[in-house]
Image: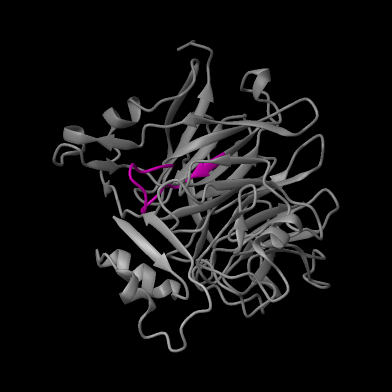
Amino acid sequence: MRLPIHKPFPMPALVAAVAGGCLLTAATLVSGQGTPPKRTTRADIDAHIVKPALMEATPERVARLNLPEGFRVAPFAKLENPRMMAVTPDGTVYVSQREPGNVVMLKDTNGDGVADVERIVAKRKQLHGLALRGKTLYFTTVKEVLSAPIKSDGTLGMPRLLIKDLPDGGQHPNRTIGFGPDGMLYISSGSTCNACEETSDESATILRANPDGTNRKIYASGLRNTIGFGWHPTSRRMYGFDHGIDWLGDDDQKEELNEIVGGKRYGWPYVFADGKPNLADDPPKGYTYDSWARTSREPELLYTAHSAPLQMAFYTANQFPAEYKNDAFVAMRGSWNRKPPSGYEVVRVKFGPTGKPVSLTPFLSGFLVQGAESGSTEGEVGHFARLAGVAVAKDGALLVGDDTNGVIYRVSYSGGKP
């Protein structure tokens, strides 16, 4: 579907037009806007809605998943809507469930690679982000950050409310948190919209605060929705994967891997990638697209548009081959607005010897099912996982959570041994 966009044109109307399958003419777009525009900007955009059908995660489908040689994947646990994960040094796995609003504790007490203890240890509406600091678990809702002490059996004590006034969530309500090498608390606060001028300065940012929630400040801005972020184990640089703008076509906006530096701006909503303009939104007064781009930091690497990056985990364990040490893994939840679909995989971020990212490659894939195999008509596509959480287990395996069928997978390395 090709959409001619003429400004001024409100983005909600554009979304409605795409969803309704309308082809709008220039007269349609410009009419009803009051005073004629001083200039006309035109961009023809090919837009698609493709929502792969949810299918069962059968043993046969799981067995056909793609991994590098020597790796294997098997179910570790099954929960309703698992999202973010955090693992303690003793191997306890905490999982957030956004829809039920729970933190679930998982344990593999006999070491067979399957969780045999499952217990709800906290409840809060729209609970999402998780982070560990010593013997305390931190978690988020849309507007809150809370902490709770971890007891000797892994259950949690009484939660303490640290922050209660984060910005409204809007389109991106899923807050995530992490502790940096400086001991400070970092909070991802996504944009309330696809692309707009925000009413809160704290929207579309990474925030930084003391561990008790005080002294909260904007650390970096112009980040549409950076759910997955972390710090490289040796360079201590902060990296995050930002979600690109929708409705710019199948191949834009690509997902951006950024080095997140304090005090820097990252382009959203006016420019993206290497300074490409988002023509649907005019820069603020006093700026052009070029000047906004020059004062914004460009991404380190780009990945396929609309892949939807979620949790990121750096690999610091020793089970995988040495070449994976200090690389990162990112859950790509998958597209709903691209033809062909993208994402539905775990991506490896390879870092060079200086601690800078050098490449992005699929690591775990095959969750998309094509054609007749999908049980649908030829040319159609289904899926049996939309990946949300990744975490490194105590034994060095990689845990990968699917928030649709609810399977948490365990990826291990055996080097070809049974």
Residue at the image position 78 percent from the left and 25 percent from the top: 353
SS assignment for the magenta stretch, majority: loop
Q: Residue at x 67, y 46 (%)?
A: 299
Residue 2 in view here:
yes
In the image, residue 180 above or below residue 342: below
The residue located at (66%, 20%) in the rendering is: 323
Residue 102 is a magenta residue: no
Of residues 90 and 47, the one nearer the viewer is: 47
The relative height of residue 308 versus residue 59 in the rendered view (above or below) is below
- Which quarter of the rendering shows the C terminus? top left
Residue 74 horizontal/vertical position (percent): 42, 30
User: How far across and how far down the image is residue 28, in percent?
Assistant: 31, 76
* Stretch in magenta: 330-343
Quarter where residue 211 is shown: bottom right
Rendered view: 33 above or below 246: below
Question: Which residue appears farthest toward the right when viewing the image?
Answer: 182
Q: Report the residue at 74% width, 55% height from top.
A: 294
Question: Quick check: 307 left or right of 269?
Answer: left
Instruction: Identify the image quadrant of the N terminus.
Output: bottom left
Against 390, is 172 above or below?
Answer: below
Asked if one can make out residue 92 in the rendered structure from this viewpoint, the answer is no
Determine the residue located farthest toward the bottom in the rendered image. 34
Foreground residue among 189 and 260: 260
Name the foreground residue: 317 vs 242: 242
